[in-house]
Image (cartoon, rainbow, N blue to C red):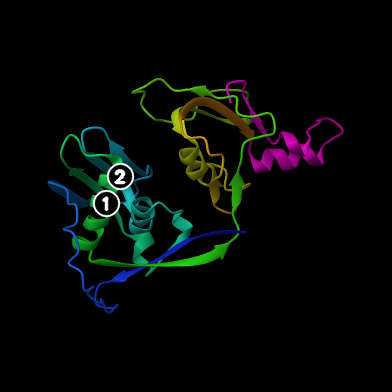
Amino acid sequence: MFENLMVRIATLGLFAIVAASAQPKAPLVFEVADIQPAKAGEKDVSISLKPGGRLDVRNANLQLLVAAAYGVDDSFVSGPPSIQTDRFNIVAKAGSQTSEAELLQMLRTLLTERFKLAVHMEKKVVPVYAMVVGKKGPKLQSAAAGEQSSCPRVEGEAGQNHRRCQAFTMEDLADLLPNIAKAYLTLPVVDMTELKGAYNFQFDWMGRGPYNAAMANTSTTSVRAGEKWRYSGRF
């Protein structure tokens, strides 16, 4: 069990907004933002904060955008059905020295001003998987400065899935795992490693179907439950 933030969103007008007595600071905003509906049938989904003050969004729904803006798992974001069904492509630009934290603040402003969303934060106790460092400590190869973050599928041993991650943080990995291994990880994954750097590593795992088949046929295939996730030597 883990205490995390649950985010609820709704269209403006459904919530009464009470003005604080102190004058709030002006919200950070993008210099320019182009928002377009995503094409029907598009499969790839991405939300990228790029160097030089740029936000690129491809085929993302509002649930994912709110989760990214507020740093929570998308399963903690609830609202009307449209937050999952409506998808958008966004290209937004800010000053070249804008930090990632500032870009996320600008994304929050964009959601409020352009999508007319109101956000309510509350605490809720929910079950999660905790990602922690093993007893022998981390054995990760640090990424080079300026290396582009990615984690594509790669070729490898037949019958398994393979990913090679470059310049990936543990927070990135915790976000990725439930999306690529849903048959195993049915709950959000929370990074509790306290590892702050970006790393290069590869990991390999057997899909749930082949794994179950292998376990049912132990007379010809020996597979231990602890080996359903097998990491390469670089992890």
Helix, strand or loop at mark 2: helix
Check contact, mark 1 vs mark 2: CB within 8 A: yes
Q: Which of these two is toward me, 187 or 195?
A: 195
Q: What's the amino acid at mark 2?
A: Ala
Q: Which residues are magenta?
A: 206-235
Instruction: Determine which of the numbered discs, if any, sits on residue 207 in the image.
Output: none
Q: What's the amino acid at mark 1?
A: Gln
Q: Residue furthest right?
A: 219
Is 135 situated left or right of 195 in this image?
A: right
Instruction: Quote the CA–CA distance across marks 1 and 2.
Output: 6 Å
Residue at 61% across, 40% down: 132
Tell me: residue 122, above or below residue 45. below
Is residue 37 visible from the viewing direction of this image?
A: no
Q: Please tell me whether residue 210 belongs to the stretch shown in magenta.
A: yes
Q: Please tell me whether residue 59 belongs to the stretch shown in magenta.
A: no
Q: Residue furthest left?
A: 31
Question: Which residue position is annotated with label 2?
Answer: 101
Residue at 27% across, 56% down: 108
Residue at 69% across, 38% down: 210
Question: Which residue position is annotated with label 1?
Answer: 105
Residue at 41% across, 30% down: 150
Task: Tell me if mark 1 has few (under 14), some (14-19) or many (20+) residues whose alpha carbon lies within 10 angstroms of its own.
Answer: some
